[in-house]
Image (cartoon, coloured by chain):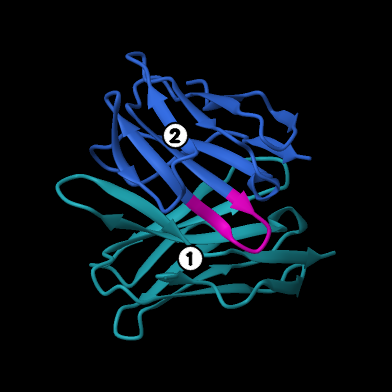
Chain colours: A blue, B cyan
């Protein structure tokens, strides 16, 4: 099976702009989660989508939003970018049932730099 | 509130020796734990997991030990190899009702295996 793919891999934006990141999960995985990784903070959960519905949400401001399409592909959007949004954004998919349901499979991430 | 804690930001060991990475948790409701490995510019990859009904799980060179009374788990790598040099994250699923959960990660430990 092909792994989780994320596009673009690198992105440079300026403060105040908005950005959309894309994620294609592993075929058959219906759950997609997004994480932000910054130095010293580990992986911080943004939100999770399952069957086109946001099922869980982390403690991020409303500038961070996402959606999931009927084919399970997901996008996340950050509006009014701030310097502190510079991070590696990781997408992960999981099978959600059966053995291994807690194992999330990560994409390579999108490195966002805000200047 | 950091419910999964990795108190050692880094660890350096010699090739062939044992690497021991530690993780503590505060939420007694956690009943499943996972370890992920992350190389630079790549997403985390699942390494090994353990259910709270066990106190040990082994997979090749990797063994995870769980001490529920101490709310502590550790990952042992024997023998350590230079290719094991990476950031290791401990994680646990935080349930939010039904089958909903979100993975809660520690901040990671950078393991360096010296030749």
State which region is magenta. A37-44
Q: Nearer the viewer, mark 2 or mark 1?
A: 2
Quadrant assignment, res B108: bottom right
- Specify the quadrant of the image occupied by residue B9: bottom right
Looking at the image, is A93 positioned above or below residue B92? above
* Looking at the image, residue A57 lies above or below residue A74: below
Image coordinates of residue A21 in percent, x first then y, are: 57, 26
Residue B73: give x, y in percent of width and height. Answer: 43, 74
Q: The residue tagged with tag 2: helix, strand or loop?
A: strand
Name the main secondary structure of what is drawn in magenta.
Answer: strand
In the rendered image, residue A46, in percent from the top left (x then y), is placed at 45, 45
Magenta stretch: residue A43 in it? Answer: yes
Residue bearing mark 1: B63
B107 drawn magenta: no
Task: Please tell me the numbered disc located at residue A65.
Answer: 2
- The quarter in which the C terminus of chain A is drawn is top right
Q: Is residue A100 visible?
A: no
Residue A20 sits above or below residue A83 on the image: above
Q: Nearer the viewer, residue B35 or A54?
A: A54
């Amino acid at each position: 099976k092909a792994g989780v793919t994320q596009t673009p891999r690198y992105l440079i934006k300026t403060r105040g702009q908005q950005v959309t990141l894309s994620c294609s999960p592993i075929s058959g995985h219906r759950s997609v989660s997004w994480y932000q990784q910054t130095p010293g903070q580990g992986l911080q959960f943004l939100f999770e989508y399952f069957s086109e519905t946001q099922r869980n949400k982390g403690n991020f401001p409303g500038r961070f939003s996402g959606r999931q399409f009927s084919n399970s592909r997901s996008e996340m959007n950050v509006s009014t970018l701030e310097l502190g949004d510079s991070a590696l954004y990781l997408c992960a998919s999981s099978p959600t049932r059966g053995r291994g349901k807690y194992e999330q499979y990560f994409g390579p991430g999108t490195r966002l730099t805000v200047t | 509130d950091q419910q999964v804690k990795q108190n050692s930001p880094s660890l350096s060991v010699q090739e062939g020796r044992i690497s021991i990475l530690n993780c503590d948790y505060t939420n007694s409701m956690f009943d499943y734990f996972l370890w992920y490995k992350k190389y630079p510019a790549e997403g985390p990859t699942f390494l090994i997991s353990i259910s709270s009904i066990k106190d040990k799980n082994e997979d090749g060179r990797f063994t995870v030990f769980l001490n529920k009374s101490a709310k502590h788990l550790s990952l042992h790598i024997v023998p350590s190899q230079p290719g094991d040099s990476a950031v290791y994250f401990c994680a646990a699923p935080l349930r939010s009702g039904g089958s909903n959960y979100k993975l809660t990660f520690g901040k990671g430990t950078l393991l360096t295996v010296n030749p």
